[in-house]
Image (cartoon, coloured by chain):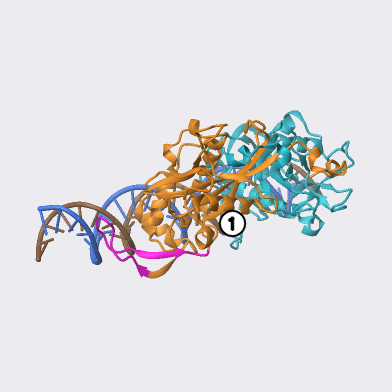
Chain colours: A cyan, B orange, C brown, D blue
Amino acid sequence: MNEQDFLAGYDPRDYPAVAVTVDVVALTIREDALHLLLIRRGAPPYEGHWALPGGFVHPDEDLAAGARRELAEETGLGGERLRRVHLEQLGSYGAPDRDPRMRVVSVAHLAFAPDLPDPVADSDADEAIWLPVTALTSRQLAFDHGRIIDDGLERARSKLEYTPLATRFLAPEFTVTELRAVYETVWGHPLHAGNFHRKVLSVPGFVESTGASTERGGARGGPRAKLYRPGDARLLHPALLRPAREESIR
Amino acid sequence: MNEQDFLAGYDPRDYPAVAVTVDVVALTIREDALHLLLIRRGAPPYEGHWALPGGFVHPDEDLAAGARRELAEETGLGGERLRRVHLEQLGSYGAPDRDPRMRVVSVAHLAFAPDLPDPVADSDADEAIWLPVTALTSRQLAFDHGRIIDDGLERARSKLEYTPLATRFLAPEFTVTELRAVYETVWGHPLHAGNFHRKVLSVPGFVESTGASTERGGARGGPRAKLYRPGDARLLHPALLRPAREESIR
DNA sequence: TTAAGTTGTTCTCAGATTGAGTTGTTCTCA
DNA sequence: TGAGAACAACTCAATCTGAGAACAACTTAA
């Protein structure tokens, strides 16, 4: 940053007031559908609209810590379960008029969680709910949260290509079929079971075998499946490619 | 964000003071080396250290607009030349103690520019210079700018894989060899000329032919090269793959 | 003017990867 | 017990990649 501005004297009160919040696009998979954690606003502006969980950054808190705290508050999650949630920064949104009350810069985060219990009613009167992403129209969403969610979904789809983060939607041990279901849900495409299987096992460090198998076969038949846990790779080489789609504009 | 906080009364003065700045990691290629725009600090803290160009967001300015303004101020660039610079958001950095004076959240941006003239001395006493990225050690850099630069470089390397943004380092018309030189300097690997050529021409929308050729052959011989301009693709399908390297930890 | 060396571009070919389909076996449900 | 489902392995053709060779068009230096 530019020291001139500071040298002029840097009493915080001298600067235009900007509030910094952290918002979280928290994704999970329930019943083979991608769900998003949202909060119903009980007061204007955007009363009755859905909004992302979030709030002001605390004075001594890092941005990521703030996002994790907000996530914990709204989901009631803690300890090991909270630690297993993948959390990354998505981007910052700071259009001057995005909040009608004052200048707010929101640092949005993206979270991948395994299927979680329904949010507990908070001390706040917030109504927090996991909603299927398909059930949302931009009009029902507060502020620019529709845009943030779109960016989060695209980021999630893309992250599955070149990272092993799909495993973060699953329990610590999982089958290849469960892993494939994650990809199919997030990408919205059916995948070739045989090829997916071959690919997952051939990419180094994606998954490692536990040696165990499921107790039962599939719900509608089939043999018991082998169980795997996440491997130690942070990136997939070579990546899994999404089926070619129409050139996405952004 | 959480309306409870707001409903309690939202006079800006009631909140802990947070300043929001935009910083820019501006990259260009000079003499086959990747260069970075830096400013020498003339006052504490970090007096004499190098810092990224940046400054406070103006009250009615979007984050990206602020970054572009800072870039314009430090490079003296404007108009069409400025518009041709690629600018994207890199991420926000908000550790509570990253600036010793007060809480500052910096929204870092990443810029790709064609070879630009040396920065003009600003109205500020700032000394702005293009420095080769290899000439930098983390100790010479102010604040957490070393980290921001690392993140920016990694983002740049990765963006060349799946976007046509390498063309943003070049003039509006360029040869395949010039384009390959961009990849080689950013990635730090020599690439196979024939394979690169084949790949660039086969990826739809990466480049399109102008029909023209260079006036002269290469400096040390060789035929005249065909000239191309950027195509209309925003993403490369299939992507160009970086030569496999040791698993990068982050 | 010529020779030597460099470079842009195209081609070849083997190896790896992918997409699509098949097979065999194990399991659940009716 | 039989039918259907699903896991896992395999096959095969099409495509893509890495590595090298070929060749013509150009440069500079002799």
Query: Measuring 62% from the left and 33% from the top, which residue is drawn there?
Result: B99
A119 part of magenta stretch:
no
Asked if B116 appears above or below B247 in the picture, the reply is below
* Front one among A225 and B4: B4
- For the record, the magenta segment spans B212-232
Taking the magenta stretch, the answer to whether it contains residue B223 is: yes
Q: Position of residue C3 (x, y in %)?
A: 11, 57
Q: On screen, A75 above or below B171?
A: above
Could you say which is closer to the camera, residue A65 or residue A119?
A: A65
Q: Chain of mark 1?
A: A
The kind of secondary structure element at disc 1 is: loop
Quadrant containing the C terminus of chain B is top right
Q: What is the quadrant of residue A144 in the picture?
A: bottom right
| Residue for point 56% across, 39% down | B148
A195 on left or right of A139: left
Dominant secondary structure of the magenta stretch? loop
- Residue B63: x and y in percent read 65, 50
Q: Say which quarter of the image contains residue B92.
A: top right
Q: Is residue B235 left or right of residue A83?
A: left
Which residue corresponds to the image point at 79% horizontal and 40% vertical from the top-left? B13
Query: Where is mark 1, residue-wise?
Result: A243
In the rendered structure, which amino acid carries the disc numbered 1?
Pro
Residue lying furthest bottom in this view? B211
